[in-house]
Amino acid sequence: MYKIFLLLLFSFILFTGCSQENEKEITISTNQWIGYAPLFYAYEKGYLDKLNIKIINNVSLAEAAELYRVGKANMVTTTQHEYNMLKHETQDIIPIILLDRSNGGDMVLSNKSIQELHSADKIYVYLEVDSINQEIIRDFIKHNGLDIKKMTFINQDQQQIQDVKFKKNRATLIVTYTPYNIHLEKKGFFEVASTKNIDAIIVIDALCTTSELLKHDKKRLLALKRSIDKSIDVIMKDPKASHQIIKKYISNMSYREYLTSLDSIKWINKPSKELLNYISDLDYKEEYIIQ
């Protein structure tokens, strides 16, 4: 009888140990972008707690990527810029859940018209250099035929950029995204371009991780995908309720600002074959995308 008891006890400990190992905490590094609202909603509603998944919210794309790079998170939200940067540095990273594409949510603000920018002797450009901002400003300069030699580039995260002063006698460009544009526009800066009208660039937001995690924790990642899809459905059907739940994650924007921000993206959590073919050129492999 004693031997049976010991055997049962050993089996229980072994089983419990395996369960705990399988349910090792997953940490997602992300930032304050409207396209990541489903993650914030799922976290606040407890969907992620049930999966032992937590989120770390950062102020910039670069900061979120850095946390992943140094091993403080095992999943990360990225545009294709951060994805390619991390792929180069860490080797093993793959996009597994598509979230949204920018439809005006990434933009260039200014205090001068395009014509006035051409006439300016010097232009100060504020952006997160090591992010998709870099590709957007490069496209903007090329599209409008501006002289890059006139430009002084100032590398700041979006929280720091919020402090940029509106000065009429100082030609300024700011590369930003929702919701950070709202405060800047209240100062007097206005949109001169966005991903809605910059045809040469598409900005895709996705959730990335290692092939190792996808292989060994596929069931939990499938459940995460279902939680994201469920959250997107609620956000679309009842934006007022979702706003109350997640506004603290997106700079406490007003409900009106929230609606405007949602209009600046398109959800791609249910990607078309056409989109999957398009992003294959960006090295987003369809076989890894959870649908």
Image (spheres, helix red, strand yellow):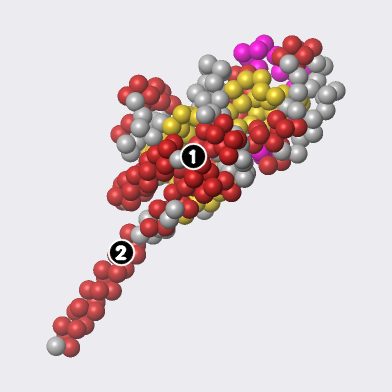
Residue occupied by mark 2? 19
In the depicted structure, whether residue 147 falls above or below residue 10? above
The amino acid type, in three-letter code, at marker 2 is Ser
Front residue (pair 196, 28): 196
Residue that sits furthest to the right in the current view: 169
Q: Residue at x 66, y 39 (%)?
A: 157
Q: Residue 7 location, x and y as percent?
A: 19, 79
Q: Residue at x 49, y 44 (%)?
A: 242
In the depicted structure, whether residue 261 falls above or below residue 55? above
Label 1: few (<14), some (14–19) or many (≥20) C-alpha neighbours in 10 Å: some
The amino acid type, in three-letter code, at marker 1 is Pro
Q: Residue at x 82, y 16 (%)?
A: 121
Q: Residue 13 location, x and y as percent?
A: 28, 74
Could you tell whether 261 is left or right of 95 in the image? right
Query: In the image, is residue 155 part of the stretch drawn in magenta?
Result: yes
Residue occupied by mark 1? 239
| Residue bounds of the magenta highlight | 141-158
